[in-house]
Amino acid sequence: MKRTHRNLFIIMASTVVFYSIVTRLPWQAAMALLGAVLLTACALALWARDLFIARYQMRRRRWMAAIARYKTFERRLLYAPWRALSVVFYLGVYTFDGVAIVRNNIAQALIAAGELDQAVKFLRLALQRDPQYAAPYVNLGVIAAMCGDEQSARREMSKAVHLGYPPARAQEILRRALDKSA
């Protein structure tokens, strides 16, 4: 079983287990549990506000502002004792490591800003945290394609596909990146 399938299974199974528990409780207990979950989610959302602001800045193409917010959130993730609870904000099939995800997102903003060397640095840092995370390999492939190194780009995309990234999507991204560099 590939990691992406396992992670998807974990997400789905957790949802089913939570639903099963809530539906079997008396309605007062279910409401109390849902209230506690909602309160916890609100507290975590406040704690993770830099992540949401960074995502907003990315959509607005404000790369440097997004990078600053992502770095602030990364520091919070590295030092907060309850950081494992924040996984609900960045659940994904490729990794559950929030620091690796944030570093990959910083690299994406750096790529968009044209800072390719810095982007490679952050992608390598993401892979140090989680070597099985497919998205940094995709971004490394994009950078290699942007630099005109088709062989390296194909090699990085191949690693991403091997780790569970959809082959058709990887080919599409690689084709677009190679077209831009030509």
Image (cartoon, rainbow, N blue to C red):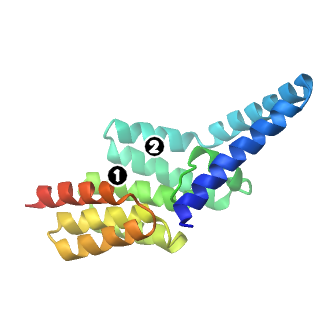
Q: In which quarter of the image is the C terminus?
A: bottom left
| Residue shown at 20% from the left, 66% from the top | 145
Mark 1 and mark 2: Cα distance apart in space: 10 Å
Residue in front for this viewpoint, 135 or 72: 135
x and y percent of residue 23 in the render?
82, 31
Q: Do the residues labelled 1 and 2 touch (CB within 8 Å)?
A: no
**Number of marks present in the image shown:** 2
- In the shown orientation, is residue 70 left or right of residue 38? left
Q: Quadrant of the N terminus?
A: bottom right
Check disc 1 and report the residue beneath it.
109
Q: Residue 54 carries which label?
A: 2
Q: Tell me the quarter of the picture where residue 114 sits.
A: bottom left
What amino acid type should be assigned to the residue bearing mark 1?
Ala
Mark 2 residue crowding within 10 angstroms, few (<14) / some (14–19) / many (20+): many
x and y percent of residue 153 in the render?
24, 70
Residue 166 seen in this snapshot: yes
- In the shown orientation, is residue 126 left or right of residue 156? right
Mark 1 residue crowding within 10 angstroms, few (<14) / some (14–19) / many (20+): many
Q: Tell me the quarter of the picture where residue 15 sits.
A: top right
| Residue shown at 62% from the left, 56% from the top | 77
What amino acid type should be assigned to the residue bearing mark 2?
Ala
